[in-house]
Image (tube, rainbow, N blue to C red):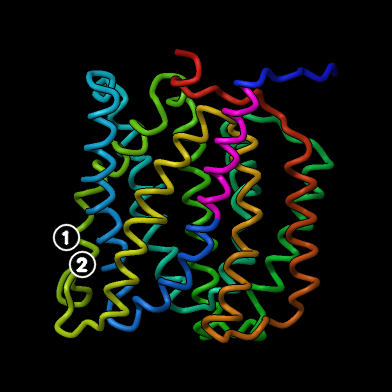
Amino acid sequence: MAIVELSEAERARRNQGVAALLTVQLFFGLLPLFGKVAFGCFAARAVAGWRIAVGGVALGAIAAALHGRRFLPERGDLPRLFLCGLLGIVLNMALFLEGLQRSTAINVALLLPLIPVFTLLVAIAARQERFDMPRAIGMAVAFCGAGLVLFERGGRIGSDHLTGNLLVVANELCYAIYFVLLRPLLAKYPPLVLTAWVFLLSAWSIPLLTGAQAPLVPDSVTRDAWWAIGYIVIFPTIFTYLLNSFALTRVSASTAASFIFLQPMVTVVGALLWLGEGLPQHFALATLLTFGGVWLVARRPAARPIAPATQRS
């Protein structure tokens, strides 16, 4: 395949996209650390409620201001957008935060690379991508690595760590289905518009997530917990979705997805230095198997990426 030389302007745009993606991985990688601080006062579901409420208002306002009439989706797309909101926002955030509360930040970080594997499995089931043996081997290897993390406490079903790890895996499966469902809509709408609408169409869940057992404002909240909530709703919620949308207009979707491998590094280093967490059993082997398996999957793309609407317009 011939190498395409980029112009100076194209190279600058690509570098801007790479810088945005690096910032996104930093913000997301620190989310489990600030989440642990917030859990000192806030229930996991309340943290999810804060993210949905603030994210919906901020992203909706910004998308409407930037895109004007293009912000309004077609009526026929609303059911799909609602389902995307349920899977990619409500269940994704609630399961992730509930899992993080019950497990360790390092365990959560080591399970993150399964997202591309689950996405591939769902895409194959939806016939968006094809199945081949090398990628099947990669998936099997990645799951072996994840299994070492899932059962790092000996596999006791009553273990809080095991429960938390399984909730994180369920969150990743929901996110994979969300991504496959959302993919066709990228051909019609700018990424920021889609993100804003899946947030807005998730607002119905806030009263269900919060309440007497998980109030948005508990009776007693420390200053550190408020700082943690502020970080979570501003940086890994609002800014990261804005930066991801910005990056998708400058790099391919596959390039953007590959940057997720940087998140575990940020989380593991932060958890060791800040939270004082210990490394799980078989850490090196689990990391090698998980990342190696995902690399086997990611190195053989099977479907032409859909360019976001903002790239083609």
Placement of 149 over or under 66, stated as above or below: below
Task: Using the image as rendered, state which of residue 258 and residue 184 is in the foreground.
Answer: 258
Q: Where is residue 218 drawn, in percent x and y?
A: 18, 78
What residue is rendered at 44% in x and 21% in y? 310
Placement of 271 over or under 304, stated as above or below: below
What residue is rendered at 65% in x and 26% in y? 11
Task: Using the image as rendered, state which of residue 218 and residue 96 is in the foreground.
Answer: 218
Say whether marks 2 and 1 touch (CB < 8 Å).
yes
Which mark is drawn over residue 210? 2
Q: Where is residue 297 drawn, in percent x and y?
A: 75, 44
The C terminus lies in quadrant: top left
Q: Is residue 16 magenta?
A: yes
Element type where label 2 sits in the image:
loop
Q: Amino acid at mark 1?
A: Pro
Find disc 1 in the rendering and name its residue: 207
Q: Where is residue 181 drawn, in percent x and y?
A: 46, 34
Element type where label 1 sits in the image:
helix
The N terminus lies in quadrant: top right
What residue is rendered at 30% in x and 57% in y? 51
Task: Using the image as rendered, state which of residue 244 and residue 216 is in the foreground.
Answer: 244
Which mark is drawn over residue 231? none
Q: Is residue 282 magenta?
A: no
Q: Main secondary structure of the magenta part?
A: helix
Q: Is residue 154 left or right of residue 87?
A: right
At label 1, counting other C-alpha atoms closer than 10 Å, the crowd grade (few under 14, some 14-19, many 20 or more) is few
Q: Where is residue 5 drawn, in percent x and y?
A: 76, 18
Residue 127 appearing in the image: no
